[in-house]
Image (cartoon, grey):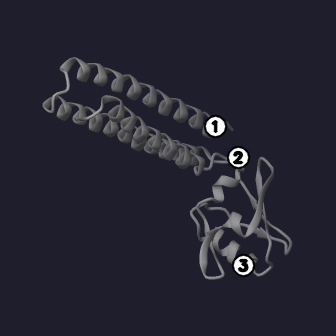
């Protein structure tokens, strides 16, 4: 027989995963402010394997408008530069032989709207995942009723799942509102 607590915990775990995915996705969306996380998705070839830039260089943000990359191996300058140019960041790195500097330009109004739309799409994907987790949980509870679970317990568990679902949807909305504010702030 299916345990109600296990069912709810499984659903909640799936919803947590959706939130973690959204946090990661929003971190990679450039909001006109320098962040070392912008480079997390960029991989470079280091001795035959593809690794994040942070594995082959010191990545820092000296101010709100720039990121500096100081490779530990001088031979990595060209590789890192090429990886940044080829990425979807859309920023040209500057290399002075000592460090690679990436200047984060202020966003245009059109680009801000584009990024806000991208955030909404990511948020919608997360919401769909949360809803799917709730639906899977409810389906599991309905199967449990056929296997002998009391209908009252099922209804209570469904109500609990709905409350958890609402909490996660609100959390997603809050995250999106915060990111939207960050993007739209000039």
Reading the chain from its start, which is encountered first: label 1 or label 2?
2
Residue 100: percent from the left, percent from the top?
78, 67
- For mark 2, does the 10 Å Cα neighbourhood hold few (<14), some (14 to 19), or many (20 or more) residues? some
Q: How many marks?
A: 3
- Identify whether 47 is placed above or below 100: below
The quarter holding residue 165 reads top left
Distance from Cα at disc 1 to Cα at disc 3: 33 Å
Residue visible at 38% across and 22% down in the picture: 163
Instruction: Tell me the SS state at disc 2.
Output: loop
- Identify whether 68 is placed above or below 151: below
Residue 182 disc label: 1
Distance from Cα at disc 1 to Cα at disc 2: 9 Å
Residue 44: percent from the left, percent from the top?
63, 73
Q: Nearer the viewer, residue 36 or 179?
A: 36
Residue 30 as seen in the image, left or right of residue 4: right
- Identify whether 26 is placed above or below 43: above
Circle 2 is placed at which residue position?
33
- For mark 3, does the 10 Å Cα neighbourhood hold few (<14), some (14 to 19), or many (20 or more) residues? few
Reading the chain from its start, which is encountered first: label 1 or label 3?
3
Q: Decide: marks 1, 2 in contact (CB < 8 A)?
A: yes
Circle 3 is placed at which residue position?
78
Residue 127 as seen in the image, left or right of residue 19: left
Residue visible at 63% across and 45% down in the picture: 31
Residue furthest toward the left? Answer: 146
Residue 137 as seen in the image, left or right of residue 142: right
């Amino acid at each position: 027989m299916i345990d109600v607590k296990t069912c709810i915990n499984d659903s909640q775990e799936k919803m947590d995963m959706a939130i973690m995915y959204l946090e990661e996705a929003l971190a990679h969306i450039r909001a006109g402010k320098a962040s070392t996380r912008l480079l997390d998705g960029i991989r470079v070839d280091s001795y035959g394997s593809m690794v994040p830039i942070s594995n082959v260089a010191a990545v820092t943000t000296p101010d709100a408008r720039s990121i500096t990359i100081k490779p530990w191996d001088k031979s990595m300058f060209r590789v890192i530069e090429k990886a940044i140019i080829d990425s979807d960041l859309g920023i040209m790195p500057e290399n002075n032989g000592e460090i690679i500097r990436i200047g984060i330009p202020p966003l245009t109004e059109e680009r801000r709207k584009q990024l806000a739309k991208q955030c909404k799409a990511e948020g919608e994907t997360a919401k769909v995942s949360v809803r799917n987790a709730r639906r899977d949980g409810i389906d599991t509870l309905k199967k449990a009723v056929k296997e002998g679970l009391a209908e009252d317990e099922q209804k209570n568990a469904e109500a609990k799942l709905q409350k958890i679902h609402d909490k996660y949807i609100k959390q997603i909305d809050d995250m999106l509102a915060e990111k939207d504010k960050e993007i739209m702030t000039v």
